[in-house]
Amino acid sequence: DLGLDEKKFTTDSSSDVVKKKVQADSELALKGQVNSTPTFFANGVKLGGYSSFDDFKKMLQDASKNCAAL
């Protein structure tokens, strides 16, 4: 249904280039303490603890105010 070239996908996903890219991305995520997706940062601070869109929106608004104060 997606029009995916399965043979190319299988070949590409098992290539050394792709494996190295995935490994590098994984290491970067661990370094940044990113353990889920999506993960959001504002002003270099990882956002978390929101359970609704309104909570998330308020966090972003608060972060924006803190940024303007700098």
Image (tube, helix red, strand yellow):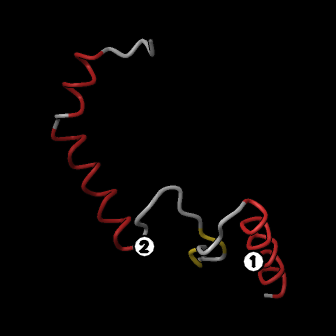
Q: Quadrant of residue 17?
A: top left
Three-letter amino acid code of the residue under disc 1: Ala
Residue at horizontal 28 percent and vertical 48 percent from the top: 21
**Residue that numbered label 1 is attached to:** 63
Residue 35 coordinates in the image, percent (x, y) = 40, 66
Residue at horizontal 29 percent and vertical 65 percent from the top: 27
**Residue that numbered label 2 is attached to:** 32
Which label's residue is closer to the chain start, 1 or 2?
Answer: 2
Three-letter amino acid code of the residue under disc 2: Gly
Residue at the extreme bottom: 70
User: Are the residues flagged by discs 1 and 2 in contact, CB closer than 8 Å?
Assistant: no
Q: Is residue 41 left or right of residue 65?
A: left
Please state which of residues 67 and 36 is positioned toward the viewer in this rendering.
Answer: 36
Label 1 packing within 10 angstroms: few (<14), some (14-19), many (20+): some
The disc placed on residue 1 is none
Q: CA distance from mark 1 to mark 2?
A: 19 Å
Disc 2 element: loop
Residue 54 coordinates in the image, percent (x, y) = 79, 64
